[in-house]
């Protein structure tokens, strides 16, 4: 694994030096003036193709990016995270990249962990790689931790396989996932989009693979835009609709929750 990690890091550095990266980094941002320069500049160390989508910020987010060679997409008014991610994905796809890395602009995700996701992408090609934070329970606010656990259960059921951190925005997507993908990007679905995409992917045979990453909550970051009760409710309603339209998809419940339990305990 260490050899593979070193080899991939060498490839990343070589590709970026020649301005030919096979992956793009997209960073949706809304009022991230305290963290965006640091996150974007660190991301540029791994890819020459960094796309920042400013979602109608009212602070100095845009001004703080002026000296960086990033592709900046500006939403004149706030459209929500779903629309911002979708715009970034479409720009990345025009560059014919193999992978699209998404990470948040508030400092929760360390760009230095990008190679860890890409290593796993090479091991499990064609799947979504998620930077999973839930193993580091002590570093996560309790309400967010338990809200994520609830979301994980429902999304795992609908996807038909275990998902360790369904609410992490730090992901490596295979570019082919977005071929003819139909998904809502309305403002109401701002925090439903990343959950729904896991279900849509599973229906195409694309699973999620977790890579453990630290849970980082920067002291200077703005308060989270995620509204726990409201957004988890919207996610649950989306999942419920998906399950009902498939006759509750009991196979998914077995594969995601029951089968793994017996598999994990079979040798104990």
Image (cartoon, rainbow, N blue to C red):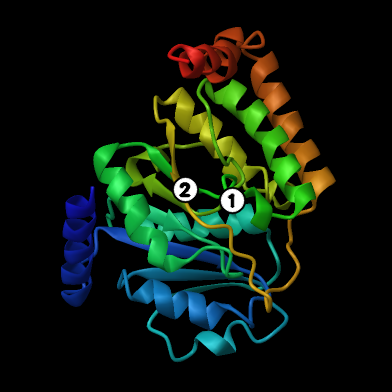
Mark with earlier residue (1, 2): 1
In the picture as drawn, the residue positioned furthest to the right comes out as 229
Q: Which residue is mark 1?
A: 136
Contact (Cβ within 8 Å) of mark 1 with mark 2: yes
Q: Secondary structure at mark 2?
A: strand
**Between 257 and 33, the one nearer to me in the picture:** 257
Q: Quadrant of residue 80?
A: bottom right
Residue 94 shows in the view: no
Q: Quadrant of residue 152?
A: top right
Q: Which residue is mark 2?
A: 212
Up/down of 14 relative to 258, above or below: below
Q: Which mark is residue 27?
A: none
The residue depicted at 74 percent of the width and 41 percent of the height is 146
The CA span between labels 1 and 2 is 9 Å
In this rendering, would 135 be left or right of 3? right
The residue depicted at 52 percent of the width and 63 percent of the height is 109
The residue depicted at 75 percent of the width and 41 percent of the height is 147
The residue depicted at 74 percent of the width and 49 percent of the height is 144
In this rendering, would 99 be left or right of 158? left
In this rendering, would 73 be left or right of 92? right
Mark closer to the observer (1, 2): 1
Q: Secondary structure at mark 1?
A: loop
Question: Residue 15 location, x and y as percent?
Answer: 18, 67
Question: Residue 3 location, x and y as percent?
Answer: 17, 53
Question: Residue 101 location, x and y as percent?
Answer: 41, 56
């Amino acid at each position: 694994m260490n050899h593979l990690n070193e080899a991939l890091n060498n490839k990343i550095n070589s590709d970026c030096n020649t301005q030919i990266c096979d992956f793009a980094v997209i960073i949706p941002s809304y009022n991230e003036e305290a963290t965006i320069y640091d996150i974007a500049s660190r991301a540029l160390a791994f890819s020459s193709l960094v796309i920042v989508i400013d979602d109608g910020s009212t602070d100095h987010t845009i001004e703080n990016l002026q000296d960086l060679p990033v592709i900046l997409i500006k939403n004149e008014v706030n459209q929500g995270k779903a629309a911002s991610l979708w715009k970034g994905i479409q720009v990345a796809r025009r560059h014919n990249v193999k992978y699209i890395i998404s990470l948040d602009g508030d400092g929760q995700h360390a760009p230095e962990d990008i190679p860890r996701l890409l290593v796993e992408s090479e091991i499990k090609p064609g799947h979504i790689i998620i930077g999973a934070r839930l193993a580091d329970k002590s570093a996560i606010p309790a309400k967010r931790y338990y809200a994520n656990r609830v979301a994980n259960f429902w999304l795992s059921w609908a996807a038909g396989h275990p998902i360790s951190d369904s609410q992490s925005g730090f992901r490596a997507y295979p570019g082919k996932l977005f071929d003819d993908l139909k998904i809502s990007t309305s403002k109401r679905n701002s925090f439903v989009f990343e959950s729904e995409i896991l279900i849509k992917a599973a229906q195409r045979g694309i699973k999620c693979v977790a890579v453990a990453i630290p849970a980082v909550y920067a002291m200077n970051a703005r308060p989270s835009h995620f509204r726990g009760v409201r957004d988890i409710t919207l996610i649950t309603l989306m999942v419920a609709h998906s399950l009902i339209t498939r006759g509750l998809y009991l196979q998914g419940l077995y594969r995601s929750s029951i089968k793994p339990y017996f598999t994990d305990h079979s040798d104990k």
